[in-house]
Image (spheres, grey):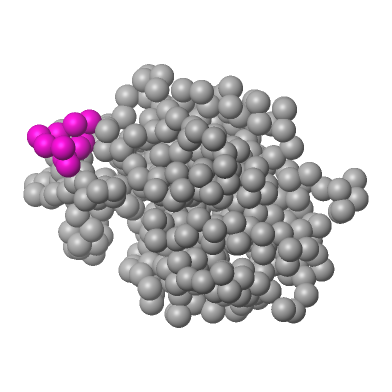
Amino acid sequence: MTLSALTSRARVETALSHEEPDAVPLALGGGPYGLVDDLYLRLVKFFNLGEPVQPFRTGHSISYMDDRLLERLGTDTRYCWPGLLPNSPVIPGKDQDTFYDSYGQVWKRAFPYYSAGEGLLKDAAGLDDIERRVHWPDLTDPRWNWGVAERARMLREETDYFVVMRMVASHGPFQTACDLRGTQAFLMDMALQPEFALALLDKVTTAIEGLMRLAMQAGGRWFDMIELPGDDYAGNLNPIMSPAMFRKFIKPCLERLVKVVKEANPATRIMLHSDGALGKLLPDIIALGIDVIHPLEPLPATDLAAVKEQFGRQVSFLGGIDISHAMPGTRQDVIAETKLRISQLARGGGYILAPSNHLQADIPAENVGTLFETAREFGRYPIQDR
């Protein structure tokens, strides 16, 4: 097969092998890089796709997975998804804006978004409360993986797309612990009550391990990549924990999740989503065997070209496209942003172009089309300075 005739799957695999394919691979629709519902519905009209597809989940502001739209945009990835997520606020509460997830954690809706309410373990007095208060997932519930095997098999055997399993939980060990305890309280636990913090992380990781094992049993033979649950360890300037703290508390949790995947299918690539200025933690994350990092967020504190130069042979990046300024801006803003990220990140392979987070309701539908049109036009290898 020549580079000029690569399939989508071969294009992504070539890039993730740190070689240059025929063009930069394109992605949209994963756990942390999709479309909010308002924008999806406008894109259906903009591209004359007909009726919207049925929502693939509830309790979220990103509810649609439409292969027709991905085809129209020319993306190289297609997705499988769980039938149920433990963090999803789908159990009705006392009013129309109050919900509970499978852990029993309360969530509040400020339309259309949801955020964790008061932590279920906010005033926990000891280790016993972790077991007693939290509803840990029942792994015998068939809803966790409804439809995963059928969808994965179809995509792998009947299409040439790169098959991605979305997150089995919206939040990873650290963020789930923060949901249950409160972020400030849990960060203090890591410093002052390490036994409690480690016990909570262990319970959360055990739950996610079980869900990932079920997903790999259902469709792992067909997954080209699986996303770890999203876990944010950094703010806009620096990580919110030291590398030493990360190694003590978080890294062992991620090691366990990576092991589940590699034991089931060593060929399945693993992606981790973690927002913020992550640079100081990248060496430890890469050492885990993570293949792809999302989003490489374009922040003033992060020199994307320098990150690519330093780490671009050790790990691949998915994302990079600024959703806060460029995507809501003019057509020329979108074109300039797309060309810039390609020039910074695409040389030598190791890059999949995608939004740095969900495309929000403030983004014009035409700008989404412009993003992918520009990427197809200027993302051909060899990459030229623009």
Q: Is residue 217 above or below residue 340?
A: above
Who's the residue at 65% across and 72% down the image?
339
**Residue range corresponding to the magenta coloring:** 91-100
Q: Is residue 153 above or below residue 225?
A: above
Task: Say whether residue 140 is visible.
Answer: yes
Report x, y in % for residue 116: 22, 48
Which quarter of the figure has residue 277?
bottom left
Who's the residue at 17% across and 42% down the image?
97
Count of picture labels:
0
Is 368 situated left or right of 266 in this image?
A: left
Who's the residue at 48% across and 35% down the image?
52
Which quarter of the figure has residue 320?
bottom right
Who's the residue at 33% across and 53% down the image?
174
| Quarter of the figure with the N terminus | top right
Pick whichever, 332 or 253, lies toward us: 332
Report x, y in % for residue 133: 15, 35
Q: Is residue 217 magenta?
A: no
Is 201 situated left or right of 12 in this image?
A: left
Pick whichever, 64 or 144, lies toward us: 64
| Quarter of the figure with the C terminus | bottom right
Task: Say whether residue 16 is visible.
Answer: no
Give the residue furthest to the right.
2
Q: Is residue 110 above or below residue 262?
A: below
Is 309 situated left or right of 377 in this image?
A: left
Report x, y in % for residue 337: 58, 72
Report x, y in % for residue 47: 58, 46
